[in-house]
Amino acid sequence: MAIHKTQRGKPLQRPPSRSSILIILTATVGCIAVFYIASSFSSTKGFFYSITETSIQSSNARNHRDSEKYLYWGKRIDCPGKHCESCEGLGHQESSLRCALEEAMYLQRTLVMPSRMCINPIHNKKGILHQSNDASSEERWAASSCAMDSLYDLDLISGTVPVILDNSKEWHRVLLTSMKLGSRGIANVQGVSREDLGSKSSYSNILLINRTASHLSWFMECKDRNNRNAILLSYSFLPSMASKKLRNAAEKIKVLLGDYDAIHVRRGDKLKTRKDRFGVVRSLHPHLDRDTRPEFISCRIAKWVPPGRTLFIASNERTPGFFAPLASRYKLAYASNYSSILDPVVENNYQLFMVERLVVMGAKTFIKTFKEDDNDLSLTDDPKKNTKTWQVPVYTLDIREC
């Protein structure tokens, strides 16, 4: 029989006990389970589609300040809602975004803004050229949208209303924390007034308020615009929050223009007509086509803009040379005159319009298409909104009106 000698001074090594083996196995299984859960989170779609880096966020979530609360209206402006599939213009989407910002301001919460804004195809030529019929809905969305921070300066907005984007690390941490808090983490609301959201503890103590369930367009939550006390942000707020590169471009153009006046001429999308049952053409804005033609513009603005002045024209009219007759009275300027400034920064017509908007805001005299406030100067007296009566267009003008 073989004899095993042991080295002097070293204790005998005993085999691991049964309890030790069980502890090791339990720890191993636990690690595998944690890895599996983390993997599941990273592939989950839907409301929590964006949770990643789970292990890192778990430690960050524990450091989350309880005083910070958030408001989420969805990952696309006006979606869900009746405009989910369609893509509205910049002004329409800004009305909805301003409404969400107002609610966040009222509730003293951080607004989680969509990281991208939908662009109507007619304002995104690059998207049309590169669009494929085989593209998925998400690919089509990417081709017909632009990054929100390419339009707006988020730091500037946050000076008035704190905002974060829905693709940011902070948003990921908020989602993770809301799941950990259970019933105190998130409240999905529909048809609840902002007053109730602010005053009732069942909502006010929740980390995250989610309005995605609403079937309305965002701006419908601010429908009562006649109540001036309910308006927390002016119409000029978002235009003045343009991204830094757009603001810089506008400043360069204004310097080159010097002392100037400006008009905004809105034609294309507002000149809608239809025939009644007798075949008569009617319009919701019966004087608009007439009032935005150069000969009538010259007559209208004569009392506000003296001859010889530099006149910057921002318009969606696409007919070449349409405003040329005004050159007999004014020095005309357009955004197209400053392509060397705009081409490096402008990628779509939303950005172009935002630059033009900043330029006209800096004019000595600015004349809008429609009168929106009592002190506005306008090219037409037709109301901009709430026009439900189709009328026969008017093209004549009494010479005494000039």
Image (cartoon, helix red, strand yellow):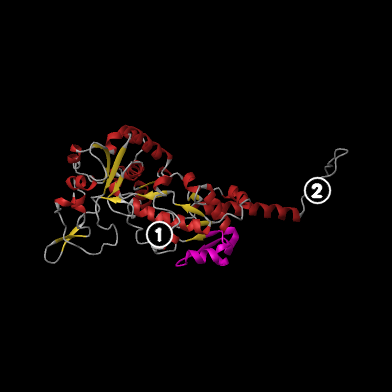
Q: Determine if residue 131 is in view.
A: no
Q: Residue at x 80, y 48 (%)?
A: 14
How far across and down, in percent of the image, does residue 148 sit? 42, 47
Judge whether residue 180 is colored magenta: yes
Q: What number is the disc on residue 114?
A: none
Mark 2 lies on a secondary structure that is loop
Q: Is residue 154 visible?
A: yes
Q: Position of residue 322 (x, y in %)?
A: 18, 42
Q: Residue at x 57, y 54 (%)?
A: 68
Q: Secondary structure at mark 1?
A: helix
Highlighted range, magenta: 179-208
Mark closer to the observer (1, 2): 1
Q: Which residue is mark 2?
A: 14
**193 vs 333: above or below:** below
Dot 1 or dot 2: first in sequence order is 2
Residue 269 at x, y = what percent? Answer: 25, 52
The residue labelled by disc 1 is 218
Q: Is residue 295 rendered to the left or right of residue 43?
A: left
- Give the percent coordinates (x, y) of residue 136: 35, 51
